[in-house]
Image (spheres, rainbow, N blue to C red):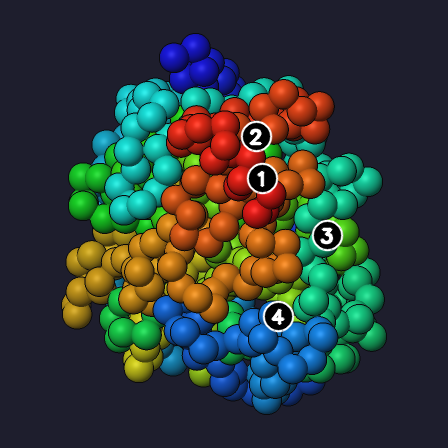
Amino acid sequence: MKFYTLAVFTALSFSSISAHSLNPRHNLYAKRQTGIPGSSANGPPAPPTATASSVLSSASVMPNPTTSSSSTANILPPVDSSSTSTSISASSTSSEKPTGPPPLATWTGVPPLESITLGMPTRPIPPVTATYAPGARPPIAGAPVLPTGLVQGSWPPTDQIPDTNSKEVRAWMKELDGFKIPDLAPTVDGSCGGDPAAAAAAAQRGWWTCGGYTRSTDIVSCPDKNTWGVSFDDGPSVYSKYVLDYLKQKNLTATFFVVGSRVVQHPAILIEEYMAGHEISVHTWSHSKPLTSLTNEQIVAELGWTRRVIKDVLGVTPTTMRPPWGDIDDRVRAISMAMGMVPIMWTATPTGNKFDTNDWMVAGGSVNGSESFKSFQSILTQASTLETGFIVLQHDLSELTVDLAVGYTLEAALSHVPRFNLEPIGQCQHFPKANLYLETNLNQTFPFRNQSAGGVDVSGDGTVDTKSGDGGSTAADVSKANADSPISAAVSTNIPLLSCLTVVVCAVMSILL
């Protein structure tokens, strides 16, 4: 219980941090949106063509590395036709009228929209009230019990790209073996204006930032009309508790795309999200730079460390991810898919407007709450015209973005006529809940697994510790067999796992693995 007490104390210690200092990296987003093809004299954007992927539930979406006729399986589908996309703004749909006046916030303590601005008075940070003892059973059939705790002090620095020379990253790089990773040079800074040459080839490289290009493996919307795939990025944070309390009161669940280094800071919040039935997905370790601007090794480090810390805290390994700022191309997709994580984006209309609430702009000080809500009203208007459902970008890192969500956007969706059905993204895709985590996933073709290694080395210690659908037993066998090894002692995992019945069984499993 010392760990959980420490987690609560850590959460309370952030009470003096402002929304701006919590999330300064969102200021980069505005810079990255300049120079998008079709946003100025280049003419109107061409309509996007991709639809939501069903890769998690399909049994034959992608080739298996071990059954492919080629020595290297190309995990990317054929290039889609040209498509572009720009961020939604209140003026981007001048022919569409807002859905009505801003509602009055009904959630306790949420200020009026016009008062939600950078530098506004802050409310008390809510305490962590739901605690779960190690060994508690998660609400997912076949999932391992909660681990004993997170070992502090041996993780990469917060908000920084992890060292690519570590033994962990070298081990994770092996997951790319047998997969064709496109030979694309990193972009200069992930922006269209910062890299004109890459922007000119956006269609060929499938660059979402410059042109909104997607692939069939990208999840970009919910298949059912009037269904909103609810998600929150950049947490967990001390303010995530407000979101959790609201969702619990409304009997709703959502998908949380978490930043690995923030999981280290707030593990108790992540546990509460998971145990309350919300979906957990990877959102990189540092969120410090766009993924297309990183090397292959850096991308692997960003994904690998996040995947590992989530497993150390929850005992499960997510099979989905979302790239920061939505910055993805075919190289980033290939690496993500090879590591067993399907990209989840957010929706764009046929005219190219992205379903972005612009709540991050409030936290960055460039707009106020009223202006952000106008963007959201435009989203609701356009969502009603779609033949499918939709996914909206929101954040739970700062008090400002959380107030907008629990006080206004979620309420507006629930009171909309026709009323929108709010679901987490995996659920809106009709994916079995078990498919969202490697330990419980029984799908034979997803996620991609390096079968020659027999499974995945999530800990990065050089030994396979996770197999699809193993319920955590593979890690138990490996942990037991290597409990006294220097390699195991060097890594900071502390997961309670099922014990081997006998020494003989452990020895046999070690040989098989």
Mark 2 Cα shell of 10 Å, populated few (<14), some (14-19), many (≥20): many
Which numbered circle lies on residue 173?
Answer: 3
Q: Residue furthest front?
A: 504
Q: Nearer the viewer, residue 256 or 196?
A: 256
Indicate whether 335 appears above or below 143.
Answer: below
Q: Which residue is mark 2?
A: 481
Q: Nearer the viewer, residue 346 or 371?
A: 346
Which numbered circle lies on residue 510?
Answer: 1
Query: Quadrant location of residue 120?
Result: top left
Q: Earlier in the sequence, mark 2 or mark 4?
A: 4
Q: Position of residue 246 (x, y in %)?
A: 25, 39
Q: Is residue 37 left or right of residue 348?
A: right
Q: Earlier in the sequence, mark 1 or mark 4?
A: 4
Identity of the amino acid at label 2?
A: Ala
Q: Position of residue 100 (x, y in %)?
A: 24, 63
Q: Are marks 2 and 1 in contact (CB under 8 Å)?
A: yes
Identity of the amino acid at label 3?
A: Met
Identity of the amino acid at label 4?
A: Pro
Q: Position of residue 337 (x, y in %)?
A: 58, 63
Q: Which residue is mark 4?
A: 65
**Residue 299 seen from this side:** no
Q: Position of residue 464 (x, y in %)?
A: 60, 44
Q: Earlier in the sequence, mark 2 or mark 3?
A: 3
